[in-house]
Amino acid sequence: MYQIITVKDEVSVPPVKFDKDLTTSVMESIGEKMEGKIDNELGVILAVMDVENIGEGRILPGNPSVHYPVDFKLLCWMPKNQEVVEGEIVDIAEFGAFVRVGGFDGLVHISQVMDDFVSYDEKNGQLVGKQSKRMLKEGDKVRARIISISFKETNKIGLTMRQHLLGAIKWATADAKEAAEAEKVEKKEEKKVEKKGKK
Protein backbone atom coordinates (compact mmCIF):
# COMPACT_ATOMS: atom_id res chain seq x y z
CA MET A 1 0.00 0.00 0.00
CA TYR A 2 1.30 3.44 -0.91
CA GLN A 3 1.31 5.94 1.93
CA ILE A 4 2.68 9.36 2.80
CA ILE A 5 4.40 9.30 6.18
CA THR A 6 5.63 12.24 8.28
CA VAL A 7 9.07 11.59 9.77
CA LYS A 8 11.23 13.47 12.27
CA ASP A 9 14.95 12.93 11.83
CA GLU A 10 18.30 14.70 11.98
CA VAL A 11 19.65 15.52 8.54
CA SER A 12 23.29 16.22 7.78
CA VAL A 13 23.95 18.88 5.11
CA PRO A 14 27.55 18.84 3.79
CA PRO A 15 29.47 22.06 3.00
CA VAL A 16 29.15 21.52 -0.80
CA LYS A 17 25.42 22.30 -0.43
CA PHE A 18 25.81 25.51 1.61
CA ASP A 19 25.45 27.68 -1.51
CA LYS A 20 21.90 26.35 -2.15
CA ASP A 21 18.61 27.27 -0.56
CA LEU A 22 18.35 25.54 2.85
CA THR A 23 15.12 23.67 2.01
CA THR A 24 16.60 22.42 -1.28
CA SER A 25 19.85 21.25 0.30
CA VAL A 26 17.98 19.53 3.17
CA MET A 27 15.60 17.83 0.71
CA GLU A 28 18.54 16.62 -1.43
CA SER A 29 20.35 15.29 1.64
CA ILE A 30 17.24 13.40 2.80
CA GLY A 31 16.80 11.96 -0.70
CA GLU A 32 20.41 10.77 -0.87
CA LYS A 33 20.12 9.19 2.56
CA MET A 34 16.68 7.55 2.24
CA GLU A 35 15.26 7.22 -1.30
CA GLY A 36 15.36 3.66 -2.60
CA LYS A 37 16.07 2.19 0.82
CA ILE A 38 13.96 -0.54 2.43
CA ASP A 39 12.87 0.04 6.01
CA ASN A 40 11.13 -2.70 8.03
CA GLU A 41 8.61 -0.20 9.43
CA LEU A 42 8.12 2.11 6.43
CA GLY A 43 8.64 -0.29 3.51
CA VAL A 44 10.32 0.99 0.35
CA ILE A 45 11.06 4.70 0.54
CA LEU A 46 10.20 6.01 -2.92
CA ALA A 47 10.52 9.80 -2.65
CA VAL A 48 10.82 12.80 -0.35
CA MET A 49 7.53 14.65 -0.81
CA ASP A 50 7.96 17.75 1.34
CA VAL A 51 10.09 19.35 4.04
CA GLU A 52 7.72 20.77 6.66
CA ASN A 53 9.99 22.14 9.36
CA ILE A 54 13.73 22.70 9.69
CA GLY A 55 15.07 23.34 13.18
CA GLU A 56 18.23 25.18 14.18
CA GLY A 57 21.37 23.59 12.78
CA ARG A 58 24.38 22.56 14.81
CA ILE A 59 27.96 21.70 13.93
CA LEU A 60 29.59 18.74 15.62
CA PRO A 61 33.32 18.70 16.49
CA GLY A 62 35.39 17.15 13.69
CA ASN A 63 32.47 17.18 11.23
CA PRO A 64 32.07 20.09 8.77
CA SER A 65 28.42 19.27 7.99
CA VAL A 66 25.53 21.12 9.61
CA HIS A 67 22.99 18.84 11.34
CA TYR A 68 19.35 19.97 11.29
CA PRO A 69 16.35 18.47 13.10
CA VAL A 70 13.77 18.14 10.30
CA ASP A 71 10.10 17.16 9.90
CA PHE A 72 9.48 15.82 6.39
CA LYS A 73 7.07 13.65 4.39
CA LEU A 74 8.04 10.48 2.54
CA LEU A 75 6.16 8.51 -0.09
CA CYS A 76 6.53 4.84 0.84
CA TRP A 77 5.22 1.49 -0.35
CA MET A 78 4.64 -1.20 2.25
CA PRO A 79 3.26 -4.55 1.08
CA LYS A 80 0.10 -5.64 2.92
CA ASN A 81 -1.27 -9.16 3.19
CA GLN A 82 -4.12 -9.85 0.69
CA GLU A 83 -3.27 -6.72 -1.33
CA VAL A 84 -3.63 -7.09 -5.12
CA VAL A 85 -0.53 -5.78 -6.88
CA GLU A 86 0.75 -5.46 -10.43
CA GLY A 87 4.33 -6.15 -11.41
CA GLU A 88 6.67 -7.60 -13.98
CA ILE A 89 8.18 -11.09 -14.17
CA VAL A 90 11.92 -10.63 -13.63
CA ASP A 91 12.97 -14.30 -13.48
CA ILE A 92 11.52 -17.75 -14.14
CA ALA A 93 12.83 -20.75 -12.23
CA GLU A 94 11.92 -24.43 -12.00
CA PHE A 95 9.99 -23.74 -8.78
CA GLY A 96 8.13 -20.56 -9.86
CA ALA A 97 8.33 -16.97 -11.05
CA PHE A 98 9.82 -13.88 -9.42
CA VAL A 99 7.74 -10.73 -9.77
CA ARG A 100 9.07 -7.18 -9.19
CA VAL A 101 6.47 -5.41 -7.06
CA GLY A 102 7.31 -1.97 -5.71
CA GLY A 103 10.91 -2.31 -4.53
CA PHE A 104 10.60 -6.00 -3.73
CA ASP A 105 10.78 -9.23 -5.69
CA GLY A 106 7.97 -11.60 -4.74
CA LEU A 107 7.76 -15.32 -5.51
CA VAL A 108 4.82 -16.98 -7.23
CA HIS A 109 5.37 -20.68 -6.49
CA ILE A 110 4.72 -22.94 -9.47
CA SER A 111 1.61 -24.29 -7.70
CA GLN A 112 0.21 -20.73 -7.44
CA VAL A 113 0.68 -19.63 -11.07
CA MET A 114 -2.70 -20.77 -12.48
CA ASP A 115 -5.53 -23.27 -12.07
CA ASP A 116 -3.81 -25.81 -14.30
CA PHE A 117 -0.89 -28.25 -14.08
CA VAL A 118 2.15 -26.05 -14.72
CA SER A 119 5.50 -27.27 -15.99
CA TYR A 120 8.83 -25.50 -16.43
CA ASP A 121 10.06 -25.23 -20.02
CA GLU A 122 13.80 -24.91 -19.41
CA LYS A 123 14.66 -24.51 -23.11
CA ASN A 124 12.49 -21.39 -23.48
CA GLY A 125 12.70 -20.22 -19.85
CA GLN A 126 8.95 -20.17 -19.28
CA LEU A 127 6.15 -21.77 -17.29
CA VAL A 128 3.44 -23.50 -19.35
CA GLY A 129 -0.07 -24.64 -18.40
CA LYS A 130 -0.78 -28.23 -19.52
CA GLN A 131 -4.42 -27.80 -20.61
CA SER A 132 -4.71 -24.04 -21.09
CA LYS A 133 -1.33 -23.77 -22.91
CA ARG A 134 -0.91 -20.38 -21.23
CA MET A 135 2.71 -19.29 -20.94
CA LEU A 136 4.47 -17.08 -18.44
CA LYS A 137 7.88 -15.67 -19.28
CA GLU A 138 10.31 -12.98 -18.20
CA GLY A 139 9.02 -9.47 -18.98
CA ASP A 140 5.31 -10.39 -18.73
CA LYS A 141 3.14 -7.93 -16.79
CA VAL A 142 1.09 -9.70 -14.11
CA ARG A 143 -1.51 -9.08 -11.43
CA ALA A 144 -1.12 -11.06 -8.18
CA ARG A 145 -2.31 -11.17 -4.57
CA ILE A 146 0.13 -11.01 -1.65
CA ILE A 147 -0.34 -14.11 0.52
CA SER A 148 2.70 -13.93 2.82
CA ILE A 149 5.23 -11.34 3.96
CA SER A 150 8.42 -11.87 5.96
CA PHE A 151 10.90 -9.16 6.91
CA LYS A 152 13.04 -11.23 9.29
CA GLU A 153 16.48 -12.00 7.83
CA THR A 154 15.61 -11.28 4.20
CA ASN A 155 12.62 -9.60 2.62
CA LYS A 156 10.29 -12.29 1.27
CA ILE A 157 6.88 -11.85 -0.33
CA GLY A 158 4.73 -14.80 -1.37
CA LEU A 159 2.24 -14.23 -4.20
CA THR A 160 -0.62 -16.12 -5.85
CA MET A 161 -2.13 -15.74 -9.30
CA ARG A 162 -4.67 -18.59 -9.05
CA GLN A 163 -7.68 -16.42 -8.27
CA HIS A 164 -10.15 -14.86 -10.69
CA LEU A 165 -8.78 -11.87 -12.65
CA LEU A 166 -5.22 -12.56 -11.48
CA GLY A 167 -2.31 -13.72 -13.64
CA ALA A 168 -0.65 -12.33 -16.74
CA ILE A 169 -2.36 -9.20 -18.05
CA LYS A 170 -2.31 -10.74 -21.54
CA TRP A 171 -4.42 -13.65 -20.20
CA ALA A 172 -7.11 -11.23 -18.99
CA THR A 173 -7.14 -9.53 -22.40
CA ALA A 174 -7.50 -12.91 -24.14
CA ASP A 175 -10.28 -13.92 -21.70
CA ALA A 176 -12.16 -10.67 -22.42
CA LYS A 177 -11.93 -11.29 -26.19
CA GLU A 178 -13.18 -14.88 -25.76
CA ALA A 179 -16.08 -13.66 -23.60
CA ALA A 180 -17.01 -11.02 -26.20
CA GLU A 181 -16.95 -13.63 -28.99
CA ALA A 182 -19.06 -16.03 -26.91
CA GLU A 183 -21.57 -13.24 -26.24
CA LYS A 184 -21.85 -12.48 -29.98
CA VAL A 185 -22.51 -16.16 -30.76
CA GLU A 186 -25.10 -16.33 -27.98
CA LYS A 187 -26.93 -13.24 -29.32
CA LYS A 188 -26.98 -14.72 -32.85
CA GLU A 189 -28.49 -17.93 -31.45
CA GLU A 190 -31.13 -15.92 -29.55
CA LYS A 191 -32.08 -14.04 -32.74
CA LYS A 192 -32.45 -17.34 -34.63
CA VAL A 193 -34.74 -18.69 -31.89
CA GLU A 194 -36.81 -15.47 -31.95
CA LYS A 195 -37.23 -15.68 -35.75
CA LYS A 196 -38.36 -19.32 -35.53
CA GLY A 197 -40.83 -18.41 -32.76
CA LYS A 198 -42.40 -15.64 -34.88
CA LYS A 199 -43.06 -17.96 -37.85
Image: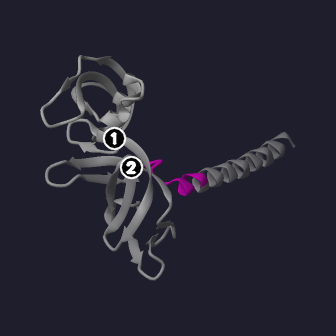
C-alpha span from label 2 to label 1: 22 Å
Q: Residues within 10 Å of mark 2 (few under 14, many from 20)?
A: some
Q: Nearer the viewer, residue 193 or 124?
A: 124
The part of the image, by quadrant, that contains residue 6 is top left
Residue placed at 47% from the left, 66% from the top?
138
Q: Position of residue 20 (x, y in %)?
A: 42, 28
| Above or below, 20 relative to 39 | above
Q: Which mark is residue 78?
A: none
Residue 1 visible? The answer is no
Please state if 174 lies on the left or on the right of 57 as rendered: right
Marks 2 & 1, CB-CB < 8 Å contact: no
Quarter of the image with the C terminus in it = top right
Which disc is residue 32 wearing?
Answer: 1
Residue located at (44% from left, 75% from top) = 125
Residue wearing tag 2: 101
Residues drawn in magenta: 164-173
- Residue found 37% across the figure and 30% down from its top: 25
